[in-house]
Image (cartoon, rainbow, N blue to C red):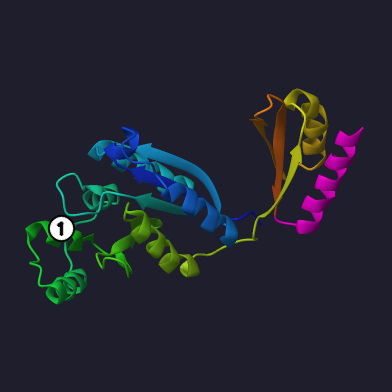
C-alpha cells in the first residue's frame, strides 16, 4: 500500500511579500518523511478569505492530511479559524476549554485576557484542540485538516503533538551520491536507472564549485533500503564507465 499523502497550506501575506522566510515547510517535510507520510503539495496563499477556503477544500479532498500554518493569532488579519469553519460549513465561537487554557495562562502573568486574545479561543464546531506547550493558545483539527500556528517554535511543538496520532506508512529511505560531472553527462545513465526502478524516486541536484566546475548530488529515495542501495550501486558503477 502506498504511504498516506499530505499537503501543507502556508497562510500569510508576510510570506508572499518576502518579509518572513517560511521555516515550517522544511520542518514538516522532514518530520513527515520520518513518519512515512508523503508531503505531496505545498501552497502559499495570502490572508484572503475566499482563497483560503478554496485551498482548504481542494487540499482536503486530495490528500489524507492537510496541515495549515499561520493566521490563528489575535489580530484582525488572523482569519484562518473562520475560513476553516466556512470551508466545512461549521459554526465557530469561543470554546470553553480553549478559553480556560488562555485564562489560566494569562492569569499567571497578570495579563488581561482581552477581546483580541480571546479570539484565539474561537474554535470551529466539533474541532479537536491541538496542544501548545509553548504559548498555550491551541491549534485544532477539523476533519483531516490540522490548523497550527505560524510561529516556528509553536508550529514545531504542535507537529510533535499530532504526529503520534497519524496513520503512517513505511519510512522513506534516502541515499545520496555526489558526482563531479555535469548533468549532461549523467542524464543518460540516471534516466535508464529510473526506468529500471519505477517505484523509486530519483533526483539530480546540480551545483557549481568555486573553481567553476560543475557537479550534482543524485538522490534516490524509496521505502525498501535494500532496493535503494541496489539502485545506487548500479548508478555508481554506470557512472564509472
> x%, y% of residue 212?
68, 24
Looking at the image, residue 132 lies above or below residue 202: below
Q: On screen, 83 above or below 15? A: below
Name the residue beneath numbered marker 1: 119
Task: Using residue 155 as the reference point, say whether residue 50 is left or right of it.
Answer: left
Residue lying at 35% horizontally and 50% vertically, measured from the top left:
69
Label 1: which secondary element? helix
Residue 142 seen in render: no
Q: Is residue 223 above or below residue 163?
A: above
Placement of the C terminus among the 4 image quadrants: top right
Q: Is residue 125 above or below residue 151?
A: below
Q: Position of residue 66 (x, y in %)?
A: 42, 52
Counting from the top left corner in percent of width and height, residue 105 is at: 19, 73
In this rendering, position of residue 95 left or right of residue 162: left
> Can the viewer see residue 48?
yes
Which residue, as the protein is rendered here, is positioned at the far front? 211
Task: State the predominant SS element of the stretch in magenta.
Answer: helix
x%, y% of residue 156?
Answer: 41, 60
Q: Residue at x 37, y 54 (%)?
A: 152
Q: Nearer the viewer, residue 46 or 18?
A: 18
Toward the viewer: 2 or 47?
47
Q: Looking at the figure, which quarter contains the N terminus?
A: bottom right
- At x 77% / y 51%, what residue is drawn? 228
How many marks are shown on the rendered structure?
A: 1
Residue 25 covered by magenta stretch: no
Would you say 241 lies left or right of 205 here? right
Image quarter of residue 113: bottom left
Residue visible at 79% across and 29% down? 186
Residue 186 in the figure: left or right of residue 152: right
Which stretch did the figure color magenta? 223-241
The crowd level at tag 1 (other Cα within 10 Å; few <14, some 14-19, many 20+) is many
- Residue 227 colored in magenta in the image: yes
Amino acid at each position: 500500500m502506498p504511504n498516506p499523502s499530505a499537503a501543507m497550506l502556508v497562510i500569510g501575506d508576510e510570506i508572499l511579500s518576502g518579509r518572513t522566510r517560511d521555516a515550517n515547510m522544511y520542518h514538516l517535510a522532514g518530520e513527515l518523511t520520518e513518519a512515512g507520510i508523503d508531503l505531496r503539495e505545498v501552497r502559499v496563499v495570502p490572508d484572503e478569505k475566499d482563497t483560503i477556503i478554496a485551498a482548504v477544500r481542494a487540499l482536503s479532498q486530495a490528500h489524507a492530511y492537510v496541515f495549515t500554518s499561520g493566521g490563528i493569532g489575535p489580530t484582525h488579519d488572523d482569519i484562518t479559524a473562520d475560513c476553516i469553519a466556512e470551508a466545512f460549513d461549521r459554526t465557530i465561537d469561543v470554546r470553553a476549554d480553549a478559553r480556560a487554557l488562555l485564562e489560566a495562562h494569562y492569569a499567571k502573568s497578570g495579563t488581561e485576557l482581552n477581546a483580541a486574545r480571546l479570539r484565539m479561543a474561537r474554535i470551529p464546531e466539533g474541532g479537536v484542540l491541538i496542544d501548545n506547550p509553548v504559548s498555550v493558545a491551541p491549534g485544532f483539527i477539523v476533519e483531516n485538516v490540522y490548523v497550527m500556528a505560524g510561529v516556528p517554535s509553536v508550529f514545531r511543538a504542535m507537529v510533535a503533538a499530532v504526529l503520534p496520532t497519524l496513520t503512517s506508512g513505511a519510512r522513506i529511505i534516502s541515499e545520496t551520491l555526489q558526482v563531479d560531472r555535469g548533468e549532461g553527462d549523467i542524464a543518460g545513465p540516471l534516466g535508464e536507472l529510473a526506468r529500471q526502478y519505477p517505484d523509486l524516486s530519483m533526483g539530480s541536484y546540480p551545483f557549481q564549485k568555486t573553481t567553476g566546475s560543475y557537479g550534482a548530488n543524485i538522490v534516490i529515495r524509496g521505502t525498501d533500503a535494500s532496493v535503494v542501495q541496489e539502485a545506487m550501486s548500479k548508478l555508481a558503477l554506470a557512472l564509472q564507465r
